[in-house]
Image (cartoon, helix red, strand yellow):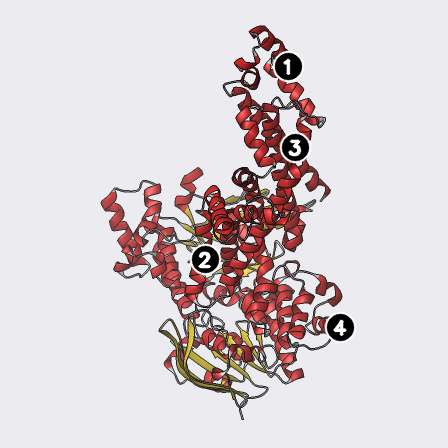
Amino acid sequence: MARYLLRRTAQAAFVLWAAFTVAYVLLQLLPGDSILIKFQNPELGLSPRQIQEIRAYYGGDVSPLESYATTLLGFLRGGFGYSIDTGTPVVERLAEALPATAVLAGSGFLLAVLIAVVIAFAAGHSRTSWIRGALLAVPSLFVSVPVFWLGILLIQVFSFRLGLVPVIGGSALQQLVLPVLTLAVPIAAPIAQVLARSIDRVQAQAFVPVVAAKGASRWWILWRHVARNAALPALTVAGVTFGELIAGSVVTETVFGRNGIGRLTEQAVNAQDTPVMLAVVVLAAAVFVLVNFAVDVLFPVLDPRLRAVTG
Amino acid sequence: MSLLDIRDLAVSYGGRPAVRGISFSVEPKEVVALVGESGSGKSTTAHAIMGLLPPGGTVDGGRILLGDADLTSWSSRRMESVRGTRIGLVPQDPANSLNPVKTIGAQIGEVFRLHGRGDRRTIRRRVVELLARVGLSDPETRARQYPHELSGGMRQRVLIAIAIALEPQLIIADEPTSALDVTVQRRILDLIDDLRAEFGTAVLLVTHDLGVAAARSDRLVVMKDGLVEEEGPTSAVIADPRAGYTARLLDDAPALSAREFRTAEPGGRGPAVVVRDLVKEFRTGRRPFRAVDGVSFEVAAGTTHALVGESGSGKTTTARMVARFAEPTSGTVEIPGAGPGRLFRRHVQLVYQNPYGSLDPRQSIAEIVEEPLRNFRLGDRAARRTRVTELLERVALPRDVAGRRPRELSGGQRQRVAIARALAAGPEVLVLDEAVSALDVTVQAQILDLLERLQRDLGLTYLFISHDLAVVRQISHTISVMNEGRIVESGTTRQVFTDPCHPYTRELLAAIPEPVR
């Protein structure tokens, strides 16, 4: 087990480094320049020489390799540099934005899993074929709904028409409901699809009639025997879709005017604030790596057959 | 009053009848064997009694009386109270019949929990008692283990423990030993016999194996195409079958037929396969595992040599090395006349056990049989087509199967296709890996006849891998008995069967279910 963990940690470190490097290179290749965007504004009345000095101050004139090395070292020490847009440390801006997004993404993910489980188990339990068919069609519908459209639609219906959730003001919880729903729906879809198929497959296995022959009801079989066997593929998908949460939160936070990592990303992109973008990419990669690491560790807990292999 | 009384039972799957009005009964403490080939409706009958027909299956008519209750009129909720308490099930396939993610103890204890028998402590005690009763050593440890940590035989014991946990009046054993080695099969059947004597449980033994049925039952019910062909006391049916179908089953069952041993005519063609000190090691964890450990044998050209053994004996690994699908760790395989590289496959071909998995479902039969000819660029299109027709004729398949797909064919027909494909490139050696094990007895007998005829006509040499001694007795000239990677005994078929030297061979032979006839 120790060797397995060591190997996985090394893999995670490599993925993070690769994400950092690719993001760094791509951001360097971008045409335009954050310093120019900010200081070339004629209103500021800066001379080209002054701009040149500012560039030097921000470290814009060192060789690309040197700059890469400095930035990487900085990241390793936990320093993400300074935002060019606001001049504040990137760490501070991230720390400010992170809690809101963590709450949004966390609840969105939990709701997505809940929706997926309800749909998949209802379909697995149902013996009426049209109900089953209808339930199994729901995820396909979900997956084809664009996040921004769903967000606007929800605001229209629940806030303006029905007046259930205030658009401005309202408690923290009220402000959270619609964004969480918007974020959860498209993520629930693939999890539900995989879980439903997985339940079908497990229900066709030979041990199921044996449990029934002990006198178990359909629900007992589904919940106590099929569920845990069917969870593994769904878990993998859940881990992968976690990445979509980050992309989803950009749109959701923008549509609902919430502060958070998504909003920060949007602002950073507009301002070509390279240090912030780089930090966001690495943060997203870190979350993704951690979640999938957790999924892999969870596998042997759920399925004893995998314990021997990883040991 | 009978314990179980089936009257005019009819079952269908989506309108297609599977059981067409059958009647029979099971008396208390009696063992009734329900015998038939695949598709006879015997398993459907068993499932119908438990109310566990697969989706699409419906009981169309008739009655299933358990005591004086008609189960066909019961709701599924009410059936749940009968399952496990009054009827127990021992399933077919011990490898997949236990939930892989739950402990053995939890799965046995579940029966008590489902029917509210006893608290946690009592259940735990009963579980350990049951595990000990079905003959598992160290029951406390077993209760904490998971199914994959147990062998097939041990798992079947666990499944029997589940079936007898609440001491039901009737146990339905659905092919309980078909997936097990013969020696294990014997011990499991003995265990069921013991428990029956102890608890006074009646057993409905569903099996395709007439040998097992004849040796273990009081009465026989022979089924074919959803109907009962013959019913009566086992000894009477075996001694004097009234239905023609029963007589044919008895004739085809290799364990029961008293055929002559095959003897090799001295052809003087020399050996076709020479295996010397073959060793195969697999790396698993720290120390290497020796699957094959110094195996040597020769097969005379034009004869059949059988490698017999139970699962894990190394027979299939040996076969794979002979057919060059695996590289030996040390030792040699000499096949005189075989070319190097790909040309080797023109000389040596393999026929697999599973006729369902070894044919590409998307190809037509003609394409499947033609493929080796295309691979070796033998003949032009017209010549290949003629060759395919000739090959299909040789394996006695009707001409019109050429355009069909594998799924439209029966298991026996598919195995004929696999044989035709193996013969396409004109090989001299065929390695047959459990080639008839998945087939019904009558089909098995036909395929064995076909193999014998092909050997005679084409002068083929067979290396025949099997766990089934009865089949081996019929087809082979010489035998090597394998156990734990080594050959423990070898000789002509007559020698091995009439005068076995090694204790393991004797145990194997004694385990063949042989009725008094």
N-terminal of the pair, mark 1 or mark 3, is 1
Front: mark 3 or 4: 3
Name which residue lies at 55% across and 20% down: A28
Task: Report if the CB atoms under discs 2 and 1 are less than 8 Å apart.
Answer: no
Front: mark 1 or 3: 3
Front: mark 1 or 4: 1
Task: Report if the CB atoms under discs 2 and 4 are less than 8 Å apart.
Answer: no
Q: Picture coordinates of residue B77 (x, y %)?
A: 54, 77
The residue singled out by tag 3 in the image is A94
Spatial separation of the CA atoms under disc 3 and disc 4: 57 Å
Quick one: SS at disc 3?
helix
Amino acid at the residue labelled 1: Gly
Spatial separation of the CA atoms under disc 1 and disc 4: 75 Å
Quick one: SS at disc 1?
loop
Q: Picture coordinates of residue A220 (x, y %)?
A: 59, 68
Amino acid at the residue labelled 2: Leu
The residue singled out by tag 2 in the image is A136
Q: Picture coordinates of residue B266 (x, y %)?
A: 43, 57
Give whichever of B235, B487 is nearer the camera.
B235
Subunit that carries the residue with mark 4: B
Considering only vertical position in the picture, is A128 above or below A276? below
Q: Badge 4: how crowded within 10 Å, few (<14), some, or many (20+)?
A: few
Task: Report if the CB atoms under discs 3 and 4 are less than 8 Å apart.
Answer: no
The residue singled out by tag 1 in the image is A59
**Do the residues at pointers 1 and 3 share their chain?**
yes
The residue singled out by tag 4 in the image is B125
Quadrant into which the N terminus of chain B falls: bottom right
Subunit that carries the residue with mark 1: A
Quick one: SS at disc 4?
helix
Q: Picture coordinates of residue B187 (x, y %)?
A: 63, 71
Subunit that carries the residue with mark 2: A
Name which residue lies at 59% across and 72% down: A216
